[in-house]
Image: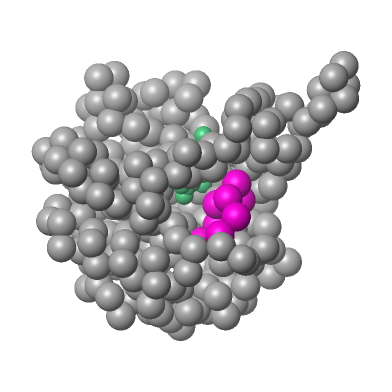
């Protein structure tokens, strides 16, 4: 028997595999047993409804995809009234994901979700590359001070586990990782997508309606692994690895680099059962290699 149990802040997960925010809606419940996952992460919500970016919003790229959804969602009230009730029936921990224009919005979202019941953790999306937040022309996760200020505001507003979701669109991930830790984040998740473009040479136009989009999938895995390792070595809080996890081998690579858990995004669009197969694959890998506790694998990279 192998033990896949892992801890993210106060969250005790029965296994380290989650589906990434925005890539796995409740409709997946018709295709797979969602209760087999370590936890369920909802799509990012904002305080007020957002209509998202103009189409086309997704396109294929070599070994990946670009998306520019732009955080389309019905806002906090819609989430609590319409989206949350069916999610409350899940038997696994529920993580909500939030984004805002300023610390005040993050606080309001945090307070609203903290008293709604069932939600055990908040993933703070500091890193969506497809939206413009208020007057700011940079992502929160691109700035140490803005990261600190946002996470501190959330920390003061809740006792729920806080996971700060970081951006790869930075020069030094270590600085932002430390700022989030200092401000009271219980864990870090990384990476969100990398800003990219695709061009149609016949129309001479960008393929995406928003011109740029976020690159995800296997193409970003090497960058994600490097950043997870850097974040792991420069902080003391658990790391959730994200970026191009397509199978159990990718997941094990992230765990060796220091991840206590992983998220599966783009793979869900190709194979809705990817996350479940990854859980089984990790289990087999551990059994074959005589590893009883997954915790022993975290950061076990030999260099
Ligand atoms: C279509 C799409 C929508 C996404 N929406 C969100 C979102 O709402 N919130 C968020 O934090 N990340 C969002 N992401 C980013 C993913 O959660 C993840 O960080 C990223 O795709 C990298 O993982 P992957 O390579 O496994 O896809 C989205 C990604 C895609 C492809």
**Looking at the picture, how far across and down is residue 13, in whole percent?**
24, 52
- Is residue 127 in the magenta section? yes
Which residue corresponds to the image point at 57% horizontal and 80% vertical from the top-left?
145
**In which quadrant of the rendered image does the N terminus lie?**
top left
Whether 236 is drawn above or below 109: the answer is below
Camera-side residue: 294 or 221?
Answer: 221
**Picture quarter containing residue 29?**
top left
Which residue corresponds to the image point at 44% horizontal and 21% vertical from the top-left?
271
Name the colour scheme. Answer: one colour
Residue 261 shown left or right of residue 200 in the figure = left
**In which quadrant of the rendered image does the C terminus lie?**
bottom right
Camera-side residue: 211 or 192?
Answer: 211
Whether 174 is drawn above or below 134: the answer is below
**Looking at the picture, how far across and down is residue 30, in whole percent?**
25, 19
**Which residues, given as a range, are shown in magenta?**
126-133
Residue 227 visible in this rendered orientation of the protein: no
- Is residue 116 in the magenta section? no
Residue 184 shown left or right of residue 135 in the figure = left
Residue 80 visible in this rendered orientation of the protein: yes
Residue extending farthest bottom = 182
Camera-side residue: 248 or 155?
Answer: 155
Which residue corresponds to the image point at 27% horizontal and 39% vertical from the top-left?
37
* Magenta span: chief secondary structure: loop
**Looking at the picture, how far across and down is residue 219, in whole percent?**
68, 37
Tally the numbered discs: 0
Camera-side residue: 52 or 266?
Answer: 52
């Amino acid at each position: 028997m192998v033990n896949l149990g892992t801890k993210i802040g106060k969250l005790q997960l029965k296994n380290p595999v989650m589906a990434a925010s925005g890539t796995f809606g409740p409709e997946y419940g018709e295709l797979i047993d969602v209760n087999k996952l370590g936890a369920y992460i909802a799509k990012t919500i904002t305080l007020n409804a957002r209509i998202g970016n103009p189409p086309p919003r997704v396109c294929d790229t070599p070994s990946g995809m670009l998306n520019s959804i732009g955080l389309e969602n019905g806002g906090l009230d819609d989430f609590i009234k319409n989206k949350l009730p069916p999610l409350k029936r899940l038997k696994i921990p529920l993580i909500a994901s939030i984004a805002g224009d300023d610390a005040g919005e993050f606080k309001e979202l945090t307070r609203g979700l903290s008293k709604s019941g069932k939600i055990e953790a908040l993933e703070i999306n500091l890193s969506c590359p497809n939206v413009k937040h208020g007057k700011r022309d940079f992502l929160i996760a691109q700035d140490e001070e803005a990261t600190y200020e946002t996470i501190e505001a959330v920390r003061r507003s809740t006792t729920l586990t806080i996971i700060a979701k970081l951006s790869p669109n930075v020069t030094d991930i270590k600085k932002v990782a430390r700022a989030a830790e200092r401000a009271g984040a219980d864990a870090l998740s990384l990476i969100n997508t990398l800003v990219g473009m695709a061009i149609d040479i016949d129309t001479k136009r960008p393929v995406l309606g928003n011109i740029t989009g976020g690159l995800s999938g296997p193409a970003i895995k090497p960058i994600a692994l490097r950043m997870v390792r850097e974040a792991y070595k420069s902080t003391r809080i658990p790391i959730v690895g994200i970026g191009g996890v397509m199978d159990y081998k990718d997941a094990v690579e992230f765990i060796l680099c220091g991840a206590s858990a992983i998220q599966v995004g783009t793979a869900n669009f190709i194979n809705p059962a990817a996350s479940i197969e990854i859980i089984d694959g990790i289990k087999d890998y551990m059994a074959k290699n005589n590893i009883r506790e997954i915790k022993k694998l975290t950061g076990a990279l030999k260099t």
